Amino acid sequence: MHGAVVYLGPSLPHEEARTICPNATFLPPIRRGDLLKVQSYEVEIVCIIDGYFFQDAAVGHREILSLLRSGITVIGSSSMGALRAAELDTLGMEGVGVIYSLYRNGTLVSDDEVALVFDPENYLPLSDPLVNIRCTLWHAQKKEVISEEEADLLIRTAQSIFYPERTYDRIATILPLPVRDRLLTFIAESGVDQKRLDAIAALERVRFLLDKE
């Protein structure tokens, strides 16, 4: 295994990811202990996008720091990667994307923001992550689909729902029917999948670094 290793799951399908960064090796969402295996391979870049939070032990800070000390470039984005990059960027980990920046500046503070449930066979998301809901509602407010007060209420409602059960349909039930229908139509046509966008940005960064070598 050479070049780059990318831990990826529900943020972006592996098939699509390979079209963006064909020279990388794509692995399932990262768990605690996975990076110990990487150190035995000839890998220059490790990109962490998706990882397990509550279903399994999350990747540890010491694992990442060990790779950094060995000279491996470690990039984080989108989900678990964004969270760890915001915690470790001063120690050498590189963060990419909007979600990383939101964690870095303190707008986001909880792991719960990027958590979701997904099908373990094909990694398809089965719930909507709070950070995507936030970004979509900010966009809907900007486009005057909903008011600032409605956006705030919807975000608070989403926060109150346990992450495996968060969906746009569920949080929208608090709205009057005409507003609900308008919002759900907007989401279907213009919803913001920030985790996907950040995953693409990270893969483009990996491809750039590989092309430089």
Image: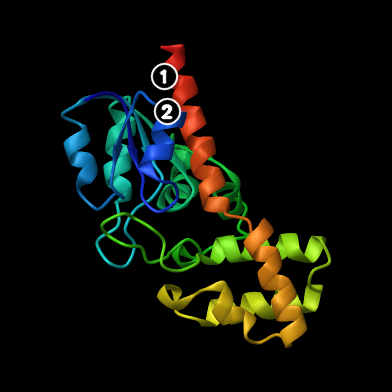
Q: Secondary structure at mark 1?
A: helix
Question: Crowding near pointer 2: few (<14 within 10 Å), some, many (20+)?
Answer: many
Above or below, 167 relative to 113: below
Per the image, the residue denoted by label 2 is 21
Q: Residue at x 56, y 45 (%)?
A: 197
Q: Secondary structure at mark 2?
A: loop
Left or right relative to 124: residue 56: left
Q: CA distance from mark 1 to mark 2?
A: 9 Å
Relative image position of residue 37 (x, y in whole percent): 17, 37
Q: Quadrant of residue 23?
A: top left
In the rendered image, the quadrant that contains the C terminus is top left
Mark 2 is on which residue type?
Cys
In the rendered image, the quadrant that contains the N terminus is top left
Left or right relative to 197: residue 50: left
Above or below, 101 relative to 129: above
Per the image, the residue denoted by label 1 is 210
Q: Quadrant of residue 139?
A: bottom right
Mark 1 is on which residue type?
Leu
Relative image position of residue 170 (x, y in whole percent): 55, 81
Left or right relative to 141: residue 67: left
Q: Badges 1 and 2: C-beta atoms under 8 Å apart?
A: yes
Left or right relative to 118: residue 56: left
Q: Quadrant of residue 108?
A: bottom right
